[in-house]
Image: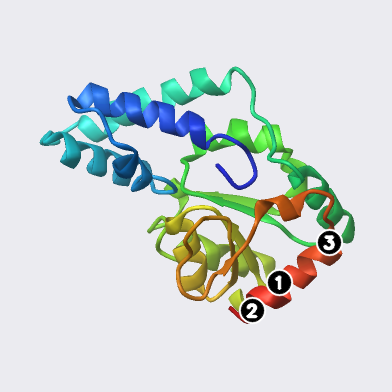
């Protein structure tokens, strides 16, 4: 969702850099990159380790509340779809292709974003706090395939983070990777291809990604 369907990664980046300041050591871009696409516990662990801050009982809940409140403030200025995404979603929905949002973002923060995208496009949504293991584990993609009544190999995952791409590949799905570097088994994909695309284009991408 974040970075793939909507342009929220800069907002997550801003809040994550601010979290580093709170814990006592500004992040470098390289440390921030290690948090992209991960769950909040993973983000807090990475930032705390970098800052040399020893997490105490209650810190996870305290800093999660801070982060989610901060993201709500940043989202209040508006959430926009990435270029071409709206047309692709509309075309797939008209054809009746079941689509799922699978995001490591927790439900309380994800819901405003899902509403901004338009919940009606999706057969379901799965968030990071609703599976036993968040990405890079394959759990939420396996669950989405189960809900769709499909084998994982019949599903196409679109991801922009290493965590997400790895999760899709581990689930056995075909994966389009919208990143500079992609894991083995993932097809590198230029997001500019979404502009003007529709369901037939998605079929072609799926066929190509299955060969990756």
Q: Secondary structure at mark 1?
A: helix
CA distance for labels 1 and 3? 10 Å
Residue at the location (43% across, 21% down)? 70
Of callouts 2 and 3, the N-terminal one: 3
Q: Residues within 10 Å of mark 3 (few under 14, many from 20)?
A: some
Residue at the location (50% across, 71% down)? 169
Residue at the location (77% across, 64% down)? 202
- Tell whether 48 sits left or right of 139: left
- Tell whether 92 sits left or right of 21: right
- x, y percent for residue 150: 67, 74
Count of picture labels: 3
Q: Quadrant of residue 152?
A: bottom right
Q: Is residue 108 above or below residue 101?
A: above
- x, y percent for residue 83: 73, 41
Q: Residues within 10 Å of mark 1 (few under 14, many from 20)?
A: many
Which residue is the site of mark 2? Answer: 210
Quadrant in which the C terminus is drawn = bottom right
Of callouts 1 and 3, the N-terminal one: 3
Which residue is the site of mark 1? Answer: 206
Q: Residues within 10 Å of mark 2 (few under 14, many from 20)?
A: some
- Tell whether 94 sits left or right of 73: right
Q: Is residue 65 above or below residue 168?
A: above
Q: Is residue 119 above or below residue 132?
A: above
Which residue is the site of mark 3? Answer: 199
- x, y percent for residue 159: 56, 56
Q: Quadrant of residue 12?
A: top left
Front position in the image: 62 or 212:
212
CA distance for labels 2 and 3? 17 Å
């Amino acid at each position: 969702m974040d970075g793939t369907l909507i342009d929220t990664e800069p907002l997550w980046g801003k809040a994550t850099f601010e979290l580093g300041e709170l814990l006592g050591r500004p992040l470098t871009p390289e440390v921030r990159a290690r948090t992209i696409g991960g769950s909040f516990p993973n983000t807090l662990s990475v930032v705390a380790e970098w800052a040399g801050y020893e997490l105490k009982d209650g810190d996870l809940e305290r800093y999660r509340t801070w982060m989610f409140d901060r993201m709500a403030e940043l989202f209040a200025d508006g959430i926009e779809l990435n270029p071409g995404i709206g047309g692709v979603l509309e075309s797939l929905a008209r054809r009746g292709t079941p689509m799922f949002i699978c995001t490591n973002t927790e439900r309380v923060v994800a819901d405003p974003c899902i509403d901004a995208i338009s919940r009606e496009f999706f057969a379901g949504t799965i968030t990071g706090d609703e599976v036993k293991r968040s990405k890079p584990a394959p759990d939420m993609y396996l669950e989405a395939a189960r809900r769709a009544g499909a084998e994982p190999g019949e599903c196409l995952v679109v991801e922009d983070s290493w965590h997400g791409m790895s999760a899709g590949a581990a689930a056995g799905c075909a994966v389009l990777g919208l990143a500079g570097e992609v894991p083995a088994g993932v097809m590198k994909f230029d997001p500019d291809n979404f502009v003007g695309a529709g369901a037939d284009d998605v079929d072609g991408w799926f066929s190509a990604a299955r060969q990756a």
